[in-house]
Amino acid sequence: MSTDTLSCEPSIFDVTAFDHDTSFAQVLQDLQTKGWSVLDDFFSEAFTQALIEEALVIETDNMLQAGVGRQKDHQIALNARRDYIQWIDPDTGVRGDFLEVMESLRTELNRRLYLGLFDYEAHFARYDKGAFYEKHVDAFKGKSNRVLSTVFYLNEEWEENDGGELVIYDEHNPDQELGRFLPKKGRLAIFLSECFYHEVRLSHKTRYSIAGWFRVNNTTGKSLDPDQ
Ligand code: OGA
Ligand code: MN
């Protein structure tokens, strides 16, 4: 082992070795033409498997009941959403590898689409049987620093009748469905946070994912951006 790969928790995955060129190019093209993208096999099979294992061992005691709103407006709204989350922090091991790929996607988005994305925050999410997240947007215009939402799915077996689909609605007509996507292992959904209403349909079994947001830095004067 060379010294530059030494760390307390060395990564067993060379995530950068997996060729992301094609999927990144597809993401860029989709975002440019329609503002959203859903891609399969975003990571290598082995890496996705490692993320699944990571998600499966998170204990509920170490998770938060997800809420709605930010900072002082934050409240747990069980009628709106019923998932448990754990922020990816600290970002070591396989979590660090995940963030590393998202970081290279961030660079690519900035380079090609001039989005000026500043950072990326992400959390594991678990929807138990009976959980859902009602139709919402992840960012209100001018009120948030979230620009792009991502959801990476970690479910080995998922059939039509298991529910839990991500539904994305039309940007200009939020009553109109653009698509329904099963939360299948290896699938990545990415969309403009302010533009697309979306929802998680009632899940009939435990559903795992990593939700994340690319953000801009809106820091002005003395007020610092909230970090979540
Ligand atoms: C979210 C969200 C969608 C999904 O966490 O804000 O909309 O498919 N998630 O899990
Ligand atoms: Mn959302």
Image (cartoon, grey):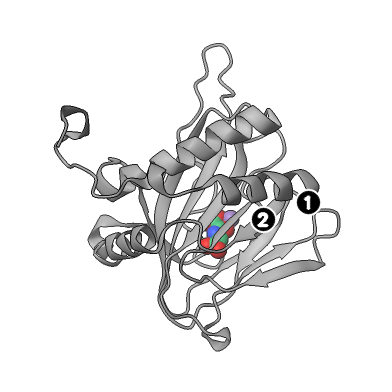
Residue at point 38%, 61% (across, down): 48
Residue 57 location (% of width, % of height): 24, 64
Residue 97 found in image quarter: top left
Residue 110 found in image quarter: top right
Residue at point 66%, 61% (across, down): 198
Kindly give the residue lying farthest to the top in the view shown.
Answer: 221
Q: Is residue 172 or residue 16 the one in the foreground?
A: 16
Disc 2 marks which amino acid? Ser
Dot 2 falls on a residue whose secondary structure is strand
Q: Which mark is residue 37?
A: 2
In space, the residues marked 2 and 1 are separated at their CA atoms by: 8 Å
Disc 1 marks which amino acid? Lys
Q: Is residue 192 visible?
A: no
Residue 204 location (% of width, % of height): 48, 83
Residue at point 41%, 58% (across, down): 44
Residue beneath label 1, please? 34
Task: Name the side, left or right, on which 220 lies relative to 228.
Answer: right
Dot 1 falls on a residue whose secondary structure is loop
Q: Is mark 2 within 8 Å of ligand 1?
A: no
Marks 2/1 in contact by CB < 8 Å: the verdict is: yes
